[in-house]
Image (cartoon, helix red, strand yellow):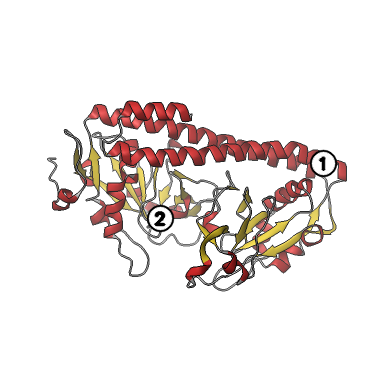
Amino acid sequence: MADIAPAYFSHLPALPQEWTYVALEDLLEPNGISYGIVQPGTAMQNGIPIVRVKDLKEGRVLQDEPLRVSPEVEEKYSRTRLRGGEVLLSLVGSVGETAIVTSELAGWNVARAIGVLRVSERVSAHWLKICLDADAAQQFVLTRLNTTVQATLNLRDVRNIPIVMPPRRDRVAISEVLQVLDDKIAANDCIAAKSLELADAQFDLASHGLDFGAETFGSVAAVVGGGTPSTKVAEYWGGEIAWTTPSDVTALSSPYLFETSRTITTTGLDNCASQLYPAHSIFMTSRATIGAFALPQIPAAVNQGFIVVLPPSDEMRWWLLHEMRSRVDEMISLANGSTFLELSRKNFKAMPIRLPSGESLVEFARLAAPLHERAAQASAENRALAELRDTLLPQLMSGKLRVRDAERIVEDAV
């Protein structure tokens, strides 16, 4: 197919000689773009897993808790059944999130809010993802959103997303530079996840055979909650205090909180029911998605979507964290609400817990603390690598930064 540049391409930033823009549609297989299951129906425990927008996180698909639909429902949407190698693009809500489908996701499907892009032989899936994450594509997406109800991107606009197309040699070189960062980030994700798995395994051993006694979460630790400062008072925001919302909580494989999406002023904090909690706190979401954890590495305040546990010691912190992690299903069963499920602090505080002897508590902390430290270290490194990638990407995609210079920067970083 001959590439016919849409009129709006003329308004895009100039590219180096031999580089051009191509409409996304021209880089896909015939009929290579579609959205997924419109009405998934009742979730089935042993059904077909599907990818939702909430499952796209930092360029990958989270597989911890997929929604599963009946085979009969999924069969009607075989056109979006994943085989591996596709690029996923979120179309509703957090529009513009991307991920490449790995082989382990073969046989999964996607929700209505996810677009499946089947890449032709003209480019690699990695190159297409790089371009979709770049400024030209992201700015195009922002100008095409329908925001009447919630942000939505139509497929007809997806087809026209501008994709930067340098000569093949440049595409390969840029891809290789960025792939080094992606590979290092993936390796760190694996380290963080395995470290957390090992800590969970140590807890399983330490808690085996322990009975629930008279102690509860509320009797061994302070249990508090968040606040609701007015979002309409400008002077409350942009301050010096980290303000945490459930959207700041990352995947369960990396629950370490280093920064938040907003900050609040002291005045704003004084006008809500929250406070500045120390870095050794345990944050747990208590609304809608119950039981996602954040271990703050910085002092932070939280909104009303959290329960905050303030352990009396570091040893107790690690035990309570894993006790909480092991009982999320039970916490969900104690939640109630007509609009969305919410676990009340009263119900959480009254939950009985298992507690080992003092010596066993100290021994578990001795084993668990370095595992969490290593996981947090890997997560912190990933933040720096992601920031570097986000800095290099627009420079490389505009041709302003030479690949050889980017290679030196990446070598120093990894």
Q: Nearer the viewer, mark 1 or mark 2?
A: 1
Whether pointer 1 and pointer 2 mark residues with C-beta atoms closer than 8 Å, the reply is no
Q: Would you say 5 lies left or right of 324 here?
A: left
Q: Toward which corner of the image does residue 380 lie, by quadrant? A: top right
Q: Mark 2 Cα within 10 Å, few/some/many (few <14, many 20+)?
A: many
> Is residue 341 in sight in this rendering?
no
Compared with 49, 174 (above or below) is above
Compared with 53, 13 (above or below) is above
Q: Position of residue 343 (x, y in %)?
A: 65, 65
Q: Three-letter amino acid code at disc 2?
A: Ala
Q: Toward which corner of the image does residue 223 lie, by quadrant? A: bottom right
**Quadrant in which the N terminus is drawn:** top left
Cα separation, mark 1 vs mark 2, equals 46 Å
In terms of depth relative to the viewer, which is nearer, 20 or 39?
A: 20
The residue at the point 32 percent across, 44 percent down is 134
Q: In what element is the residue under mark 2?
A: loop
Q: Along the polypeptide, which appears first: circle 1 or circle 2?
A: 2
Report the disc number at residue 334.
none
Q: Would you say 351 lies left or right of 162 here?
A: right
Q: Would you say 98 lies left or right of 365 here?
A: left
Q: Position of residue 91 (x, y in %)?
A: 35, 56
Q: Would you say 129 lies left or right of 283 here?
A: left
> Is residue 172 in sight in this rendering?
yes
The residue at the point 51 percent across, 51 percent down is 66
Q: Three-letter amino acid code at disc 1?
A: Val
Report the disc number at residue 111.
2
Q: Mark 1 Cα within 10 Å, few/some/many (few <14, many 20+)?
A: some
Report the disc number at residue 362.
1
Q: In what element is the residue under mark 1?
A: helix
In terms of depth relative to the viewer, which is nearer, 120 or 243?
A: 243
Q: Toward which corner of the image does residue 339 lie, by quadrant? A: bottom right
